[in-house]
Amino acid sequence: MEILSSCKDAIRTCLESRSFSVAHLYTNEFPRNGAIHIHDNYEINFSVSGGKQFLIDRHVYPIQPGDIFFINQYESHFPAQADGQPHERIVLSVFPEYLNELSSSDTDLNCCFSMRSEGVGHRLSLTEEEQKQFLQYIRRLSALQGYGTDLLEKALFTELMVYLNQLFLRQADQNAQFCTRNEQFTSQTNQILSFIDSNLQAELTIELLSQKFFLSPSYLCRIFKAATGTTINKYISAKRISRAKLLLGTGHSVSETAELCGFRDYSNFLKTFSKTVGMTPKKYAQCSS
């Protein structure tokens, strides 16, 4: 498979293929003003050179060579330049539904992205031997070509995700059965997520969702946070901003975008978008055209 040289290309390829992509990067493509961004795919960020800091959902992580960061599609993040030097890293963009398809009832490959309980964060520090093993997977993926490439990519990627989750669970001192799926719990959460995604233009509140799914507000918030690693309000905001970026990039006006994304207050849309993306909606539309 092709190893890309741009994070933006990796994200686009991942979303278009609805599977995964790999990029080998040496520079930070994102704005230097501390802009935090959110996108619709998972991200595995492996630091080759270190020398930066990662800001993820207001948590600051110093980055050392061999660190891996697991970021889900709800978590805002920004790699902050710490020393003015290029930051070499390998980034895997993963389509969430693709990872669900590869998972089984006994093995949830989402663990490294969804486990955010006390003492379990985003970072995994690899030993030298583990770093060699990770890089070997990347080299094997990059060498694939010809007959059967699609099946071999899928098999090798599945093996890589099992390996990373094993390391993540071991380092977090968690029992693998903690991630075994509860069918009723998963079904409830997926229904809530589907409803939110289909009704971003409408008014969405915890109270409304509570009534819709006949759940108490406290229980609703608890199962949602356990399943996604984020709160309902943060998820709604992230999805609305993600949709806003898509609409602005396809020619919609700022006012149309605000309305289609469920922002009742235009000034609130401008403030939220600018804070999340790092630039105004108008400027983002100009950069995307």
Image (tube, helix red, strand yellow):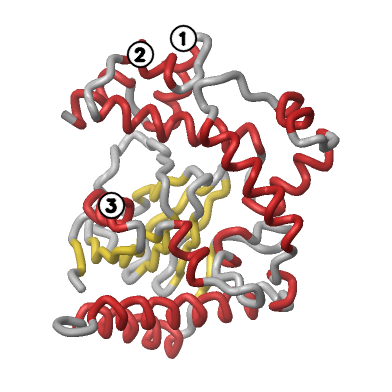
User: Tag 3: residue type?
Assistant: Glu
Q: Residues within 10 Å of mark 2 (few under 14, many from 20)?
A: few
Where 159 sits versus 111, above or below? Answer: below
> Closer to us: mark 3 or mark 1?
3
Q: CA distance from mark 3 to mark 1?
A: 32 Å
Where 158 sits versus 79, above or below? Answer: below
Task: Residue at 24%, 47% (x, y): give it.
Answer: 29
Q: Does dot 3 land on a helix, a strand or a loop?
A: helix
Task: Residue at 32%, 51% (x, y): give it.
Answer: 15
Q: Single out the residue that lies furthest toward the bottom.
A: 129
Please provide percent x and percent y for residue 117: 72, 58
Relative to 185, 7 lies left or right: left
Task: Residue at 35%, 13% (x, y): give it.
Answer: 256
User: Tag 2: residue type?
Assistant: Glu
Relative to 28, 188 lies left or right: right
Q: Residues within 10 Å of mark 3 (few under 14, many from 20)?
A: few
User: Tag 1: residue type?
Assistant: Ser
Residue 25 shows up from this direction:
yes
> Closer to us: mark 1 or mark 2?
2
Mark positioned earlier in the residue sequence (2 or 3): 3
Residue 84 shows up from this direction:
no
Please provide percent x and percent y for residue 263: 50, 16
Residue that carries the numbered disc 2 in the rendered image: 256
Quadrant in which the C terminus is drawn: top left
Mark positioned earlier in the residue sequence (3 or 1): 3
Q: Does dot 2 land on a helix, a strand or a loop?
A: helix
Residue that carries the numbered disc 1 in the rendered image: 267
Residue that carries the numbered disc 3 in the rendered image: 16
